[in-house]
């Protein structure tokens, strides 16, 4: 029963040595050129005949399946080999970004992410508070407060309401009249970069569309003449803004290079009273 | 032939199961693979020259792979892991090329 089911492979044949079993597959898939050499191979082994043969028949001889233990071991090793190659290639194809990053870069990325998630968590808490308030609120009191608060925020940003808070006061005296509109624009941009929320230059409240121009008798801001000395009030984090203005090659250095005298005074509380009509 | 089938089966298995490389093995697997590649080429060359011996092949395959990984491991412990792995890859690469040249000479006579 079992003998009929199994294919007549060399392993199931008579208990011969593996070398003796070799000509057996030849009866099934023998090539014409292998014919005359097969008997010699069976007796003396393949070593002398393999070297004397033509390359192509050598190759086909190599590819002929023989079920010896060594062949099986080779096949098994090849299997492991192919498996390892594919595994390694696949492992290599993703996450190359972090695998090649150095330790300090990774630490930087990690602390960045931590900060961001902290901030987002804070936002989430605020929004959930607002949501809970709105849900509890029957007469629209919280919604009204929220809307008012938002109107205040937007008013501050747009420059339509006066503002109070900590900030810096910057005074620029310009005895040589060398300060141009571009310098004041630089100062304003630097303050905005440093997180200034409300800025007033002279008596002009800076908004999103504030512009500076060089006029015949001095600098114009939003079309209004700015007489020196220029006084800039900026509400925001005083320390950050003072640092940003004072960096080497920054605004303060440039203005001093033009012969202007610059003083930056941090203030715990100051009022920006100028408003924009729009 | 069986080796070829095994190779294909291994690739297919790897594609199907999509395994991850364990962390402790990550620096050493590429080197072991290069060493195994060298053993493969060496085996084909020996077979073509008629001096193929299964026992030698199996032992050199396993032994070289383990030895290469061990060298890199030792290099890692000594703090010269990347340099040493470069060196191992260079040596094995030279061997692979010389084996490939021998195979080519045998097969095509050129």
Image (cartoon, rainbow, N blue to C red):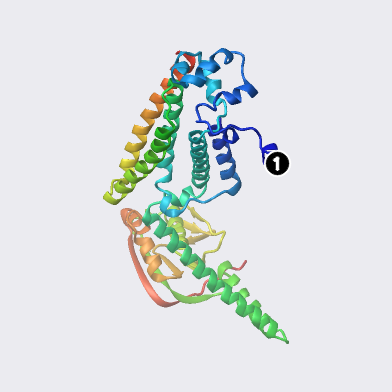
Residue sitting farthest toward the left: B78
B99 on left or right of A278: left
Q: Position of residue A194 (x, y in %)?
A: 44, 63
Q: Chain of mark 1?
A: A
Q: Position of residue B56 (x, y in %)?
A: 39, 33
Q: Position of residue B66 (x, y in %)?
A: 38, 43
Residue, disc 1: A1
- At 46% from the left edge and 13% from the top edge, which residue is drawn? A52
Residue sitting farthest toward the right: A138
Residue sitting farthest toward the bottom: A139
B83 relative to A38, above or below: below
- At 34% from the left edge and 63% from the top edge, which residue is drawn? A262
Quarter where residue A108 is shown: bottom left
Front one among B23 and A74: A74
A190 relative to A60, above or below: below
- At 32% from the left edge and 44% from the top edge, which residue is drawn? B71
A155 on left or right of B56: right
- At 49% from the left edge and 14% from the top edge, which residue is drawn? A53
């Amino acid at each position: 029963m079992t003998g009929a089911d199994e294919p007549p492979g060399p392993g199931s044949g008579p208990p011969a040595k593996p070398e003796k079993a070799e000509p057996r597959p030849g009866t099934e898939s023998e090539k014409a050129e292998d014919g005359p050499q097969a008997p010699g191979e069976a007796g003396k082994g393949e070593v002398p005949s393999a070297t004397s043969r033509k390359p192509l028949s050598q190759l086909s001889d190599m590819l002929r399946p023989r079920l010896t233990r060594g062949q099986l071991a080779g096949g098994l090793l090849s299997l492991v080999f192919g498996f390892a190659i594919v595994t390694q290639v696949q492992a290599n194809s993703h996450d190359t970004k972090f695998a090649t990053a150095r330790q300090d870069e990774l630490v930087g990325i990690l602390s960045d992410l931590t900060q961001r998630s902290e901030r987002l968590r804070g936002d989430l808490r605020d929004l959930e508070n607002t949501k809970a308030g709105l849900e509890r609120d029957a007469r629209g009191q919280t919604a009204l407060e929220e809307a008012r608060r938002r109107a205040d925020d937007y008013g501050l940003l747009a420059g339509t309401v006066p503002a109070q808070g900590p900030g810096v006061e910057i005074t620029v005296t310009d005895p040589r009249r060398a300060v141009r509109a571009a310098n004041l624009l630089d100062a304003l941009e630097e303050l905005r970069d440093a997180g200034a929320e409300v800025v007033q230059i002279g008596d002009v409240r800076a908004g999103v569309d504030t512009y500076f121009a060089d006029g015949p008798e001095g600098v114009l801001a939003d079309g209004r003449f700015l007489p020196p000395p220029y006084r800039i009030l900026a509400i925001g984090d005083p320390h950050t803004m003072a640092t940003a203005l004072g960096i080497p090659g920054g605004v303060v250095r440039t203005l001093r290079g033009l012969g202007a005298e610059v003083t930056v005074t941090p203030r715990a509380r100051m009022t920006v009273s100028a408003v924009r009509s729009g | 032939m069986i080796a070829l089938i095994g190779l294909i089966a291994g690739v297919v298995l790897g594609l199907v199961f999509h395994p991850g490389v364990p962390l402790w093995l990550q620096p050493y697997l590429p080197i072991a693979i290069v060493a195994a590649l060298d053993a493969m080429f060496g085996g084909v060359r020996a077979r073509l020259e008629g001096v193929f011996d299964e026992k030698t092949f199996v032992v050199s395959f396993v032994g070289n792979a383990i030895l290469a990984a061990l060298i890199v491991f030792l290099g890692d412990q000594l703090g010269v892991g990347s340099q040493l792995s470069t060196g191992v890859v260079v040596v094995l690469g030279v061997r692979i090329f010389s084996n490939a040249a021998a195979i080519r000479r045998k097969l095509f006579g050129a």
